């Protein structure tokens, strides 16, 4: 347990930031799930629209340090590949 005033403050800040980051992470995952749902439904136009909405949010999560850059790049690449496959089918 934190004893010094600065350690107590740091513990308060860490908890506040943890909750804020969890909220942002959850929001980003929700957008990713929306894209996946549209892909599974097989609707190209809706999937592409959902991806256009999710992409800037995913990128901003990288800038905020919520997700690693390569993780977001991997997810975006896979989703785009699936969306392109929908168009071809």
Image (cartoon, rainbow, N blue to C red):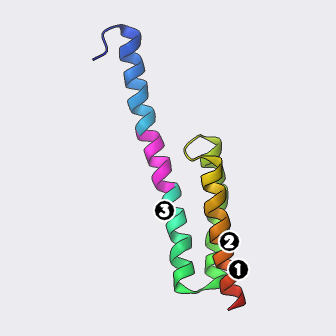
The C terminus, quarter of image: bottom right
Q: Is residue 60 above or below residue 46?
A: above
The N terminus, quarter of image: top left
Between marks 1 and 3 in the image, the one whose residue lies nearer the viewer: 1
Q: Is residue 22 magenta?
A: yes
Q: Is residue 85 left or right of residue 19?
A: right
Q: Position of residue 80 (x, y in %)?
A: 68, 71
Find disc 1 in the rendering and name its residue.
84
Residue that protrudes farthest toward the top in the picture: 4
Secondary element type, mark 3: helix
Find disc 3 in the rendering and name its residue.
30
Q: CA distance from mark 1 to mark 2?
A: 6 Å
Secondary element type, mark 2: helix
Find disc 2 in the rendering and name its residue.
80
Q: Is residue 27 above or below residue 45?
A: above
Q: CA distance from mark 3 to mark 2?
A: 17 Å
């Amino acid at each position: 347990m934190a004893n010094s005033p600065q350690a107590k403050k740091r513990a308060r800040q860490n908890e506040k930031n943890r909750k804020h980051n969890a909220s942002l992470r959850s929001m980003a995952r929700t957008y990713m799930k929306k894209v996946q749902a549209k892909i599974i439904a097989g609707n190209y136009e809706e999937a592409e629209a959902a991806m256009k909405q999710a992409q800037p949010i995913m990128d901003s999560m990288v800038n905020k340090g919520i997700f690693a850059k390569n993780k977001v790049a991997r997810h975006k690449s896979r989703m785009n590949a699936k969306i392109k496959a929908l168009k071809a089918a």
